[in-house]
Image (tube, grey):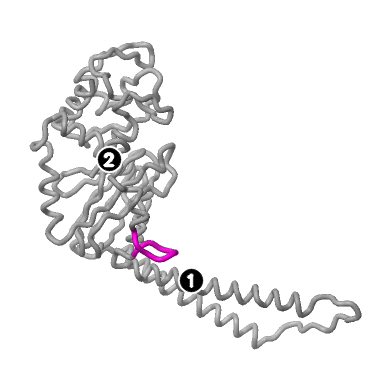
Amino acid sequence: MIDAMGGLPLGAWALFAQSTGSFWMPGEHSTFAPEVDRVFYFILAVCAFFFLVVLGLMIFFVLRYRRRPGVKPGKTATHSTPLEVGWTLALVAIVAVIFYKGFTAFMEMETPPQGCYEIRVTGRQWAWQFTYANGHVDDVLHVPVDQPVKLTMTSQDVIHSLSIPDFRVKMDLVPGRYTSTWFKAVNPGEYPLYCTEYCGDKHSQMITAVVVHSPGEFAEWLKGANDYLENLSPAEAGKLLYTKRGCVQCHTIDGSANPNTPAPSFKGIYGETHDLVGGATVVVDDNYIRESILEPGKKVRAGYRPIMNTYQGLVSDQEIVALIEFIKSLK
Protein backbone atom coordinates (compact mmCIF):
# COMPACT_ATOMS: atom_id res chain seq x y z
CA MET A 1 0.00 0.00 0.00
CA ILE A 2 2.92 2.35 0.64
CA ASP A 3 5.55 3.53 -1.79
CA ALA A 4 8.91 3.10 -0.05
CA MET A 5 10.53 5.78 -2.18
CA GLY A 6 8.20 8.67 -1.47
CA GLY A 7 6.14 7.45 1.44
CA LEU A 8 2.90 8.04 -0.44
CA PRO A 9 0.24 5.45 -1.18
CA LEU A 10 1.05 3.61 -4.36
CA GLY A 11 -0.67 5.37 -7.22
CA ALA A 12 -1.80 8.27 -5.02
CA TRP A 13 -0.98 10.81 -7.70
CA ALA A 14 -2.77 8.69 -10.30
CA LEU A 15 -5.96 8.69 -8.23
CA PHE A 16 -6.76 12.10 -9.65
CA ALA A 17 -6.83 10.68 -13.15
CA GLN A 18 -8.74 7.56 -12.08
CA SER A 19 -11.51 9.51 -10.36
CA THR A 20 -14.52 9.60 -12.65
CA GLY A 21 -16.53 12.77 -12.96
CA SER A 22 -17.48 15.64 -15.23
CA PHE A 23 -15.29 18.28 -16.82
CA TRP A 24 -15.93 20.53 -13.82
CA MET A 25 -16.09 18.18 -10.85
CA PRO A 26 -14.68 14.78 -9.75
CA GLY A 27 -16.94 11.77 -9.24
CA GLU A 28 -19.84 11.85 -6.79
CA HIS A 29 -18.82 9.29 -4.15
CA SER A 30 -20.56 10.54 -1.00
CA THR A 31 -24.20 11.08 -0.08
CA PHE A 32 -24.14 14.88 -0.20
CA ALA A 33 -21.91 15.20 -3.28
CA PRO A 34 -24.88 15.24 -5.72
CA GLU A 35 -26.57 18.14 -3.90
CA VAL A 36 -23.33 20.13 -3.76
CA ASP A 37 -22.91 19.59 -7.49
CA ARG A 38 -26.48 20.69 -8.22
CA VAL A 39 -25.85 23.98 -6.42
CA PHE A 40 -22.57 24.42 -8.29
CA TYR A 41 -24.09 23.73 -11.71
CA PHE A 42 -27.07 26.01 -11.01
CA ILE A 43 -24.76 28.90 -10.10
CA LEU A 44 -22.59 28.12 -13.14
CA ALA A 45 -25.65 28.15 -15.42
CA VAL A 46 -26.90 31.47 -13.97
CA CYS A 47 -23.47 33.08 -14.40
CA ALA A 48 -23.09 31.74 -17.94
CA PHE A 49 -26.60 32.91 -18.91
CA PHE A 50 -26.12 36.48 -17.70
CA PHE A 51 -22.60 36.62 -19.11
CA LEU A 52 -23.93 35.75 -22.56
CA VAL A 53 -26.89 38.15 -22.21
CA VAL A 54 -24.69 41.07 -21.16
CA LEU A 55 -22.01 40.29 -23.75
CA GLY A 56 -24.60 39.84 -26.50
CA LEU A 57 -26.36 43.11 -25.70
CA MET A 58 -23.05 44.92 -25.46
CA ILE A 59 -22.00 43.74 -28.92
CA PHE A 60 -25.46 44.55 -30.36
CA PHE A 61 -25.46 48.09 -28.94
CA VAL A 62 -21.89 48.76 -30.03
CA LEU A 63 -22.74 47.76 -33.61
CA ARG A 64 -26.28 49.17 -33.76
CA TYR A 65 -25.59 52.53 -32.14
CA ARG A 66 -22.06 53.19 -33.22
CA ARG A 67 -21.15 56.70 -34.40
CA ARG A 68 -21.68 57.06 -38.16
CA PRO A 69 -21.07 60.02 -40.53
CA GLY A 70 -24.16 62.19 -41.07
CA VAL A 71 -26.17 60.64 -38.25
CA LYS A 72 -26.96 62.88 -35.29
CA PRO A 73 -27.39 61.45 -31.80
CA GLY A 74 -31.01 60.91 -30.84
CA LYS A 75 -32.74 61.12 -27.50
CA THR A 76 -32.08 58.35 -24.99
CA ALA A 77 -34.56 56.97 -22.47
CA THR A 78 -33.87 57.71 -18.81
CA HIS A 79 -35.31 54.55 -17.29
CA SER A 80 -38.16 52.04 -17.40
CA THR A 81 -39.79 51.35 -14.04
CA PRO A 82 -41.43 48.03 -15.07
CA LEU A 83 -38.12 46.82 -16.48
CA GLU A 84 -36.17 47.81 -13.36
CA VAL A 85 -38.71 46.22 -11.02
CA GLY A 86 -38.84 43.10 -13.19
CA TRP A 87 -35.13 42.39 -13.27
CA THR A 88 -34.75 43.25 -9.57
CA LEU A 89 -37.43 40.72 -8.57
CA ALA A 90 -35.97 38.13 -10.94
CA LEU A 91 -32.49 38.52 -9.45
CA VAL A 92 -33.87 38.40 -5.88
CA ALA A 93 -35.66 35.15 -6.74
CA ILE A 94 -32.50 33.63 -8.22
CA VAL A 95 -30.40 34.66 -5.19
CA ALA A 96 -33.08 33.26 -2.86
CA VAL A 97 -32.98 29.90 -4.63
CA ILE A 98 -29.15 29.83 -4.45
CA PHE A 99 -29.26 30.71 -0.74
CA TYR A 100 -31.85 28.06 0.06
CA LYS A 101 -30.10 25.27 -1.86
CA GLY A 102 -26.68 26.26 -0.53
CA PHE A 103 -27.89 26.59 3.07
CA THR A 104 -29.65 23.22 3.13
CA ALA A 105 -26.60 21.51 1.60
CA PHE A 106 -24.32 23.26 4.10
CA MET A 107 -26.48 22.24 7.08
CA GLU A 108 -26.44 18.61 5.93
CA MET A 109 -22.65 18.71 5.69
CA GLU A 110 -22.32 20.34 9.13
CA THR A 111 -24.74 18.04 11.00
CA PRO A 112 -23.39 14.50 11.41
CA PRO A 113 -26.06 11.85 12.04
CA GLN A 114 -26.21 9.67 15.12
CA GLY A 115 -24.05 6.55 15.15
CA CYS A 116 -21.11 7.89 13.16
CA TYR A 117 -17.88 5.89 13.22
CA GLU A 118 -15.37 8.39 14.64
CA ILE A 119 -11.77 8.69 13.48
CA ARG A 120 -9.31 11.19 14.94
CA VAL A 121 -7.15 13.06 12.46
CA THR A 122 -3.86 14.80 13.26
CA GLY A 123 -2.12 16.98 10.70
CA ARG A 124 1.50 18.04 10.92
CA GLN A 125 4.23 19.13 8.55
CA TRP A 126 3.87 17.24 6.27
CA ALA A 127 1.89 14.11 7.02
CA TRP A 128 -1.53 12.85 8.03
CA GLN A 129 -2.21 10.61 11.02
CA PHE A 130 -5.52 8.76 11.44
CA THR A 131 -6.29 7.16 14.81
CA TYR A 132 -9.04 4.54 15.02
CA ALA A 133 -11.25 3.47 17.92
CA ASN A 134 -9.02 0.47 18.76
CA GLY A 135 -5.89 2.66 18.93
CA HIS A 136 -4.50 1.76 15.51
CA VAL A 137 -2.73 4.64 13.76
CA ASP A 138 -2.34 4.85 9.99
CA ASP A 139 -1.21 7.38 7.40
CA VAL A 140 -4.00 6.29 5.03
CA LEU A 141 -7.66 6.91 5.85
CA HIS A 142 -9.65 3.65 5.80
CA VAL A 143 -13.45 3.82 6.08
CA PRO A 144 -16.41 1.47 5.61
CA VAL A 145 -18.82 1.98 2.72
CA ASP A 146 -22.41 3.10 3.39
CA GLN A 147 -21.67 4.12 6.98
CA PRO A 148 -21.38 7.73 8.22
CA VAL A 149 -17.85 8.60 9.34
CA LYS A 150 -16.99 11.58 11.53
CA LEU A 151 -13.50 13.04 11.46
CA THR A 152 -12.39 14.90 14.61
CA MET A 153 -9.30 16.84 13.65
CA THR A 154 -6.50 18.98 15.02
CA SER A 155 -3.04 20.19 13.97
CA GLN A 156 0.28 19.90 15.78
CA ASP A 157 1.92 22.92 14.17
CA VAL A 158 0.31 25.18 11.56
CA ILE A 159 -3.11 25.35 9.93
CA HIS A 160 -3.77 22.49 7.53
CA SER A 161 -6.88 21.79 5.48
CA LEU A 162 -8.18 18.29 4.80
CA SER A 163 -9.77 17.94 1.38
CA ILE A 164 -11.42 14.89 -0.23
CA PRO A 165 -12.72 16.19 -3.57
CA ASP A 166 -14.69 13.04 -4.45
CA PHE A 167 -16.67 13.38 -1.21
CA ARG A 168 -16.94 17.21 -1.41
CA VAL A 169 -15.26 17.39 2.00
CA LYS A 170 -12.98 20.24 3.05
CA MET A 171 -12.23 21.38 6.61
CA ASP A 172 -9.36 23.24 8.29
CA LEU A 173 -7.25 21.72 11.07
CA VAL A 174 -6.33 24.40 13.60
CA PRO A 175 -3.60 24.12 16.28
CA GLY A 176 -4.93 24.07 19.83
CA ARG A 177 -8.54 23.22 18.99
CA TYR A 178 -10.70 20.54 17.37
CA THR A 179 -12.69 20.81 14.18
CA SER A 180 -14.85 18.13 12.65
CA THR A 181 -16.52 17.04 9.44
CA TRP A 182 -18.33 13.94 8.27
CA PHE A 183 -19.23 12.00 5.15
CA LYS A 184 -20.85 8.78 4.02
CA ALA A 185 -19.00 7.08 1.18
CA VAL A 186 -21.22 5.24 -1.29
CA ASN A 187 -18.71 3.49 -3.57
CA PRO A 188 -15.78 1.23 -2.55
CA GLY A 189 -12.43 2.31 -3.96
CA GLU A 190 -9.50 4.67 -3.39
CA TYR A 191 -9.77 8.44 -3.54
CA PRO A 192 -7.19 11.23 -3.08
CA LEU A 193 -6.91 13.19 0.16
CA TYR A 194 -4.63 16.17 0.43
CA CYS A 195 -3.92 19.43 2.23
CA THR A 196 -5.32 22.58 0.60
CA GLU A 197 -3.82 25.14 3.01
CA TYR A 198 -0.22 26.13 2.30
CA CYS A 199 1.73 24.75 5.27
CA GLY A 200 5.41 24.95 4.34
CA ASP A 201 8.02 23.68 1.92
CA LYS A 202 6.48 20.24 1.38
CA HIS A 203 2.84 21.30 1.29
CA SER A 204 2.37 19.72 -2.14
CA GLN A 205 3.59 16.35 -0.79
CA MET A 206 1.03 16.24 2.02
CA ILE A 207 -1.14 13.81 0.12
CA THR A 208 -2.54 10.39 0.92
CA ALA A 209 -5.60 8.32 0.04
CA VAL A 210 -9.01 7.36 1.37
CA VAL A 211 -9.67 3.63 1.07
CA VAL A 212 -13.39 2.81 1.14
CA HIS A 213 -13.87 -0.84 2.08
CA SER A 214 -16.68 -3.06 0.83
CA PRO A 215 -19.26 -4.27 3.39
CA GLY A 216 -17.60 -6.43 6.06
CA GLU A 217 -14.03 -5.73 4.92
CA PHE A 218 -13.35 -2.72 7.13
CA ALA A 219 -13.56 -4.58 10.46
CA GLU A 220 -11.35 -7.36 9.09
CA TRP A 221 -8.78 -4.85 7.83
CA LEU A 222 -8.74 -2.96 11.14
CA LYS A 223 -8.14 -6.12 13.15
CA GLY A 224 -5.26 -7.24 10.94
CA ALA A 225 -3.72 -3.75 10.70
CA ASN A 226 -3.55 -3.42 14.48
CA ASP A 227 -1.58 -6.67 14.84
CA TYR A 228 1.42 -5.67 12.76
CA LEU A 229 3.69 -5.24 15.80
CA GLU A 230 3.09 -8.88 16.72
CA ASN A 231 3.21 -10.23 13.18
CA LEU A 232 6.38 -8.48 12.00
CA SER A 233 9.94 -8.39 13.28
CA PRO A 234 10.87 -5.19 15.19
CA ALA A 235 12.91 -3.85 12.26
CA GLU A 236 10.11 -4.59 9.76
CA ALA A 237 7.54 -3.01 12.06
CA GLY A 238 9.83 0.00 12.45
CA LYS A 239 10.05 0.37 8.68
CA LEU A 240 6.26 0.44 8.52
CA LEU A 241 6.10 2.96 11.36
CA TYR A 242 8.69 5.11 9.56
CA THR A 243 6.02 5.72 6.93
CA LYS A 244 2.89 5.60 9.09
CA ARG A 245 4.20 8.12 11.61
CA GLY A 246 5.39 10.57 8.97
CA CYS A 247 9.16 10.19 9.53
CA VAL A 248 9.50 9.70 5.79
CA GLN A 249 8.48 13.31 5.15
CA CYS A 250 11.74 14.65 6.61
CA HIS A 251 14.24 11.81 7.20
CA THR A 252 15.66 9.88 4.25
CA ILE A 253 16.98 6.33 4.61
CA ASP A 254 19.45 6.35 1.71
CA GLY A 255 21.93 8.88 3.06
CA SER A 256 20.97 11.54 0.56
CA ALA A 257 21.46 15.19 1.48
CA ASN A 258 18.39 16.72 -0.10
CA PRO A 259 18.49 20.51 0.45
CA ASN A 260 14.71 20.47 0.90
CA THR A 261 14.93 17.85 3.66
CA PRO A 262 15.00 19.64 7.04
CA ALA A 263 16.31 16.63 8.99
CA PRO A 264 19.31 14.25 8.90
CA SER A 265 19.16 10.93 7.11
CA PHE A 266 18.70 7.79 9.21
CA LYS A 267 21.16 5.74 7.17
CA GLY A 268 24.21 4.63 9.14
CA ILE A 269 23.73 7.06 12.03
CA TYR A 270 23.39 4.46 14.80
CA GLY A 271 26.60 4.42 16.89
CA GLU A 272 27.95 7.64 15.37
CA THR A 273 28.94 10.68 17.40
CA HIS A 274 27.15 13.86 16.32
CA ASP A 275 27.81 17.50 17.13
CA LEU A 276 24.89 19.31 18.73
CA VAL A 277 23.71 22.90 18.61
CA GLY A 278 25.63 24.65 21.38
CA GLY A 279 28.88 22.71 20.93
CA ALA A 280 28.21 19.45 22.82
CA THR A 281 28.35 15.98 21.26
CA VAL A 282 26.19 12.87 21.61
CA VAL A 283 26.38 9.21 20.63
CA VAL A 284 23.40 8.02 18.61
CA ASP A 285 22.24 5.08 20.75
CA ASP A 286 18.90 3.75 21.97
CA ASN A 287 18.53 6.42 24.63
CA TYR A 288 19.30 9.29 22.27
CA ILE A 289 16.83 8.04 19.64
CA ARG A 290 14.13 7.62 22.27
CA GLU A 291 14.80 11.09 23.64
CA SER A 292 14.76 12.59 20.13
CA ILE A 293 11.32 11.06 19.51
CA LEU A 294 9.80 12.24 22.78
CA GLU A 295 11.74 15.50 23.31
CA PRO A 296 13.06 16.44 19.84
CA GLY A 297 14.06 19.98 20.84
CA LYS A 298 16.29 18.94 23.75
CA LYS A 299 19.37 17.86 21.77
CA VAL A 300 19.35 19.22 18.22
CA ARG A 301 22.03 18.11 15.79
CA ALA A 302 24.29 20.90 14.57
CA GLY A 303 23.25 22.28 11.19
CA TYR A 304 19.53 21.61 11.67
CA ARG A 305 16.65 23.61 13.11
CA PRO A 306 14.43 22.38 16.00
CA ILE A 307 11.25 22.04 13.92
CA MET A 308 10.23 18.47 14.83
CA ASN A 309 7.10 18.03 16.97
CA THR A 310 7.11 15.77 20.00
CA TYR A 311 5.61 12.28 19.75
CA GLN A 312 4.98 12.18 23.51
CA GLY A 313 1.73 10.26 24.01
CA LEU A 314 1.51 9.39 20.31
CA VAL A 315 3.81 6.37 20.19
CA SER A 316 4.05 3.41 22.53
CA ASP A 317 7.25 1.97 23.99
CA GLN A 318 6.89 -1.00 21.65
CA GLU A 319 6.71 1.33 18.65
CA ILE A 320 9.78 3.25 19.83
CA VAL A 321 11.72 -0.02 20.11
CA ALA A 322 10.62 -0.95 16.58
CA LEU A 323 11.82 2.40 15.22
CA ILE A 324 15.17 2.01 17.00
CA GLU A 325 15.64 -1.47 15.50
CA PHE A 326 14.77 -0.12 12.05
CA ILE A 327 17.38 2.66 12.36
CA LYS A 328 19.93 0.08 13.56
CA SER A 329 19.27 -1.97 10.43
CA LEU A 330 20.18 0.92 8.13
CA LYS A 331 23.86 0.10 7.91
Residue 328 placement (x, y as % from top left): 20, 22
In the picture, measured across the screen, residue 219 lies left or right of residue 106, that is left
Say which mark, if any, is on residue 43.
1
* First in sequence: mark 1 vs mark 2: 2
* Residue type at numbered disc 2: Asp
Q: How dense is the environment of label 1, judged by Cα within 10 Å: few (below 14), some, or many (20 and up)? A: some
The residue indicated by pointer 2 is 3
The picture quadrant where one finds residue 66 is bottom right
The structure residue drawn at horizontal position 43% and vertical position 27%, both measured from the top left corner, is: 259
At mark 2, the secondary structure is loop
Mark 1 and mark 2: Cα distance apart in space: 40 Å
The picture quadrant where one finds residue 267 is top left
Magenta range is 19-27
Residue 155 placement (x, y as % from top left): 33, 43
Say which mark, if any, is on residue 216.
none
Residue 191 placement (x, y as % from top left): 30, 55
